[in-house]
Image: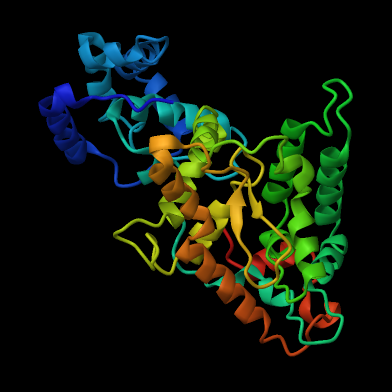
Amino acid sequence: FIFFSFFPHITLLERLYSQREMNSQPEWVDCIQASEMCNQNPHCSSRYRVMRQCLVGKEKETMLDNNKECQAALEVLLVSPLYDCRCKRGMKKELQCLQNYWTIHMGLNEDMEDLSPYEPIAPNRQPDEFGLAAISSETEKNCNPCLVATKACNLNGICKRQRSTYITTCSKLDTNKGESCNRKRCHKALRAFLDRVHPELSHGLLFCPCQTKGCAERRRQTIVPECSYIDKEKPNCLELRTTCRQDYLCRYRLADYMNNCGKTPHTMGTCPNKDNHQACLASFVRLIGTEMTPNYVDSSSTNWTISPWCTCKGSGNQEEECLNFLRHFTNNTWIYHIFADLHIHSQNDPHPCSLSAGTDTRPLTQIHRQLSFV
């Protein structure tokens, strides 16, 4: 994965950005719709085809820097709806939408970790509104909130069916390749579970608060880590990042996570989207089922750590860069504050580990009407 330099045309870009600001739409559209709008305009559609050709092959960097036709195409597209378009999380044509987005942004030297191709989420939701207070604390003897979360899932037809599907898929031996499972199918089934099941139920399984090792181990096993997470060898984190960036879905979900949860020297101890718990937590969850799948690294119920399956050993002179990237997961102040808040809220349940008292078993249509969940 290469970020392409466009610096030889600073004057051109300054003019384009200025022109775009004067003509830009006040509201964004999704990139599928933006592409259709462009195709209805002969001038835009012809430039769009040219731009896609400019990004094909090994010489694309040279084409973007030196080819006047590519520069002219970019000039038109920067003032079209395609530049400001975004994608909706979980939309049916998400991959196609991301490809359309990438066609415009690939040649602008824009840092992937500073941008998110997804629609913004309104910063108005607190952690407990994800329904995790329903998965209560372990103040009662022999109480296992993760078991309660599983029972809550099984009481809902969609959750039970989707959970059964991904567990079966991720546990099935892949005899054709001689491997323990088919990771791609496992990841796809996990993404389907998280896309189709209401977060009140799926997040309860992922983030149930634990005070015992048995509970924490059940939580760690939620995503069937032997297939979805653990590999034969642990790759270098920078290599894993490169692999992720070569896949449209993983690339943009990682960018979305970095944008909503990324810790930088300017945001140490805070969050880029301050008080926006929903955006950060949703971005974290959507990494599950990609090459950058995060998980709990052990069964600790207190000093737990979350990380992708990677290491910074053997990084050489890139060790600092590798460690900085890994810390976005293992030492992310924002993520840990969110998880801590979720656990604190769960401890306020007056009926700990009581499924009937703590779990909403109404049909999801009723829950959706009460929760303004996007």
- In terms of image quadrants, where is residue 86? top left
Quadrant into which the C terminus falls: bottom right
The image shows residue 212, relative to residue 70, as above or below, that is below
Q: Position of residue 78 (x, y in %)?
A: 27, 29
Q: Position of residue 224 (x, y in %)?
A: 79, 48
Give the residue displayed 73% in from the left and 44% down from the top: 190
Left or right: 246 as drawn, with respect to 132: left
Q: Position of residue 329 (x, y in %)?
A: 52, 54
Give the residue displayed 80% in from the left and 62% down from the top: 218
Q: Residue furthest bottom?
A: 350
Q: Position of residue 49 (x, y in %)?
A: 38, 13
Left or right: 89 as drawn, with respect to 119: right
Left or right: 76 as drawn, with respect to 309: left
Disc tally is: 0
Quadrant into which the N terminus falls: top left
Does residue 362 appear in this view? Answer: no
- In terms of image quadrants, where is residue 55? top left
Seen from the viewer's position, the closer of residues 339 and 242 is 242
The image shows residue 4, relative to residue 359, as above or below, that is above
